[in-house]
Image (cartoon, coloured by chain):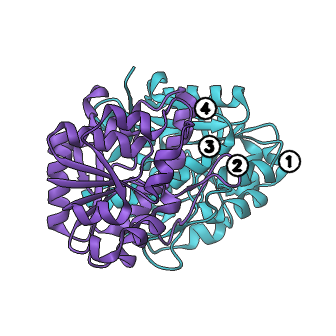
Chain colours: A purple, B cyan
Amino acid sequence: MRIAVLGTGAVGRTLADRLAGQGHDVVIGTRDVDATLARTESASPGQPPFTAWQAEHPRIRLLTFAAAAGHAETVFNATSGMGALRALQAAGEANLAGKVLIDVSNALDFSGGMPPVLKPVNTDSVGEQIQRAFPEARVVKALNTMNCQIMVDPARIPGEHNAFICGDDAAAKAAVTELLASFGWPREAIIDLGDIGASRGTEMVLLLWLRLMQAFGDADFNFAVLRAS
Amino acid sequence: MRIAVLGTGAVGRTLADRLAGQGHDVVIGTRDVDATLARTESASPGQPPFTAWQAEHPRIRLLTFAAAAGHAETVFNATSGMGALRALQAAGEANLAGKVLIDVSNALDFSGGMPPVLKPVNTDSVGEQIQRAFPEARVVKALNTMNCQIMVDPARIPGEHNAFICGDDAAAKAAVTELLASFGWPREAIIDLGDIGASRGTEMVLLLWLRLMQAFGDADFNFAVLRAS
């Protein structure tokens, strides 16, 4: 499949690497290709500049958001949630129309210091904003409740744990379920929360996630939902 | 132990019943004793009026918030989160000072219809509001991420699942851990998230909880956190 991953950070790289390893035709999208390639410093601790990463992943091309989305049949939004709408506007409505758009982002606003706040919250979510802004895109919110290493390799956490999906397009959710299954997610571990409005729920869990990361000292954990019956 | 449970709803009744069954001296607090006893209709579907419940639990006395808190060494806030501060003000600062105050509430505002919104959110929480309003109380946020049946009987959900606690007073958290252990919570299943600020995380998870309840058609589930190591 031709897949675009929008976002050059750790989440985008991890998804792109995994998808390319599965044999998909993967491109990464960025706002300004030259600027991304010109950066020589680490964007965050332990993360090499994009050029260093790309040297080890020569088959994954770096394109503009628009060229990447235009190339793809399926698009991952792995930009930061705060910048997601701007990135997708740059990708272009026509390049997203009719496509499965998997939103893995969280709009954590760190501008006021720690802990971050979520914007929007309660009455809206990034997932819903994206679906409203791009009504022809088939948005599925998924995988945003865990570290990116776990997204693409759930077996690194022993035991039965869960991925949540939601969206308004049942066929798109079925397609995302297949993609997740290809990452190793057991189908019964993928919980369909209903329409895209459930993004509020999965995004708002991030503040608990951050507290758990603080308590554990690592991000190598995931949520599970256990039922009585 | 002398324990006051503030709140006559399903959560308050379930906690009071369990604690009384363990041999504690349990009282339930309400705003207006006469008004609570005068109600003949169900407060919510499937829930008998308080008098019917009390007829089956004659050892559990109904008192005003102030009398209940004054009687107790340990206080549960099982009022609705939206009314928690008013209820605790009625209980009285002096009656809460120095006591372990276990806040199990969630401030879900249904006034705008479904889905509810959380107030406060992001930059504050009910747990923090209570601790600020009653600086001498030893507030521990606990058990608010699950149905009340599970709070007092975790074994009804098979497998390893978790309870979260947070608060500023380590000895109070240790006391709550013992209470939870007496309900059947394995100590290793109780995750200490740190200071009372973590209430933001455990309260904000409620929107996901509500979506899960909708998806499952029941509330008989709980969260677990699975770690790689």
How far is the residue under mark 3 from the one under mark 1? Answer: 26 Å
The residue lying at 42 percent from left, 30 percent from top is A220
The residue marked by circle 1 belongs to what chain? Answer: B
User: Is there CB contact under 8 Å for labels 4 and 3?
Assistant: no
Residue type for callout 4: Val
Tag 4 residue: B176
Please give the chain letter of the residue carrying mark 4: B
Please say if the residues under marks 2 and 4 sit with CB atoms less than 8 Å apart.
no
* Badges 4 and 3, same chain: yes
Kindly indicate whether the residues beneath marks 3 and 2 are on one polypeptide chain.
no
Q: CA distance from mark 2 to mark 4?
A: 31 Å
Residue at 56 percent across and 57 percent down: it is: B106
Give the total number of marks visible in the rendering. 4
Q: Which mark is residue A113?
A: 2
Foreground residue, B180 or B15?
B180
Whether residue B219 appears in this view of the structure is no
Chain letter for mark 3, please: B
Classify A121 as above or below B228. below
Which disc is residue B94 wearing? 1
Q: Secondary structure at mark 2?
A: loop
Q: Residue furthest right?
A: B94
Q: Position of residue A216 (x, y in %)?
A: 52, 27
Q: Do tags 3 and 1 sit on the same chain? A: yes
- Say what amino acid the circle numbered 1 marks: Ala
Q: Is residue B184 visible?
A: yes
Q: What whole-number distance in Å separates the C-alpha atoms at marks 1 and 2?
A: 35 Å
